[in-house]
Image (cartoon, rainbow, N blue to C red):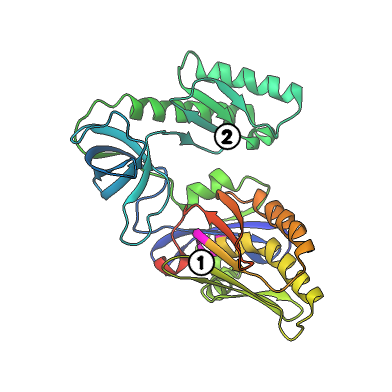
Amino acid sequence: MKGRTIILDHLGDREAAALMVDGKLDDLLIDSDAPRPGTVYRAIADRPVKGQGGMFLKTPDGSAFLRQIKGLAPGQPILVQVTGFAEPGKAIPVTAKILFKSRYAIVTPEAPGLNISRSIKDEALRDRLLEVAHDSAGDSGFGLILRSSCAAADDDDIAEDITAMLDLAARVMEDGGTGMEVLSEGDGPHVLAWRDWTAPAEVVTEPGGFEDHGVMDEVEAARGPQVGLGGGASIYVEPTRALVAVDVNTGSDASLAAGVKANMACARLLPRALRVRGLGGQITLDLAPMPKKDRRAFESALRAAFRGDDVETALVGWTPLGHFELQRKRMRAALSEVL
């Protein structure tokens, strides 16, 4: 099966969306019981955390944690937005810098101005998009960003999207309540797939699509730690309480050349391995032995691989023991937590 296919279905009673690329599971979104990223609360300041510059907040879904709380006093209501999934037993991560994101537009209430994705370079197209934005936004004081997906979109669809996001932003930001409340739910897997998987693809919505398109087999494989790299090499991706450990194994070939080859293959496949497992946090790579002169090429390959990934990932660098560390935002529930 060649090309890109988006399948909207369910895993058990959970809404789910899968992106298959050339017959391989490239991304997987599964709903969970945790608050969805993007959810906006009217929260109540609870108690500050000394030494961390943050404060615990009360929300309808439990305790949340907000950093940078200058001027915030206990008992005060504040609008916050969920930024990711909390680790088990920890508070919901939130921010006071709220934004409203859709397929074509991002509304930034606290950052006025109009911006267009830098990936859209055609000046005539940029001028046309500016005209659409000005006509749709009118005299709104909110900021607006037009996403790269606007390049291949119909003007009417873009205008409709801008209007819907501005209306939602106005309803939420002009809220005058004082008690805890969910003001806007974050997007579920099906809407997220429409919003973020914008490259041309076949879309399958019929029930049973996961079985028919091989998603279930891929999900079952992703529940295990091993990812084949070819030629007998593999990586093992294993989450622990403290971090995600990634071990590169060259198989029966213990040469330095095999180590370099396996490490480069790991760099290319790691983003997909983490996406489909829903893994984030601190990630430590135990690489196969390779000459130090090849480290820069490995870093370049890793950086290139994560450039196309939607989840914010920082390449931290090498440890004294020769491991490589990354820090990845927890933007989705781990596969092991929802299945």
| Marking on residue 188 | none
Query: Residue 216, relative to residue 283: is it above or below?
Result: below
Residue type at mark 1: give it. Answer: Val
What element does badge 2 sit on?
Answer: loop
Query: Residue 225, relative to residue 127: is it above or below?
Result: below
Q: Residue furthest top?
A: 139
Q: Nearer the viewer, residue 222 or 259?
A: 259
Q: Nearer the viewer, residue 35 or 56?
A: 56
Q: Which residue is mark 2?
A: 104
Query: Residue 268, relative to residue 98: is it above or below?
Result: below
* Classed neighbour count for the residue bearing mark 2: other residues with Cα under 10 Å, few (<14), some (14–19), many (≥20): many
The residue shown at (56%, 16%) is: 135
> What percent of the width, then of the height, locates residue 16?
47, 59
| Marking on residue 244 | 1
> What percent of the width, then of the height, locates residue 17?
52, 57
Residue type at mark 2: give it. Answer: Tyr
Quadrant placement of the C terminus: bottom left
Quadrant placement of the N terminus: bottom right
> What percent of the width, then of the height, locates residue 237?
56, 71
* Quadrant position of residue 38: top left
Of the numbered discs 1 and 2, the one sitting upstream in the chain is 2
The residue shown at (22%, 38%) is: 44
Q: Nearer the viewer, residue 153 or 240?
A: 240
Q: Nearer the viewer, mark 1 or mark 2?
A: 1
The verdict on residue 278 being magenta is: yes
What element does badge 1 sit on?
Answer: strand
Extent of the magenta region: 275-282
The residue shown at (59%, 27%) is: 156
* Classed neighbour count for the residue bearing mark 1: other residues with Cα under 10 Å, few (<14), some (14–19), many (≥20): many
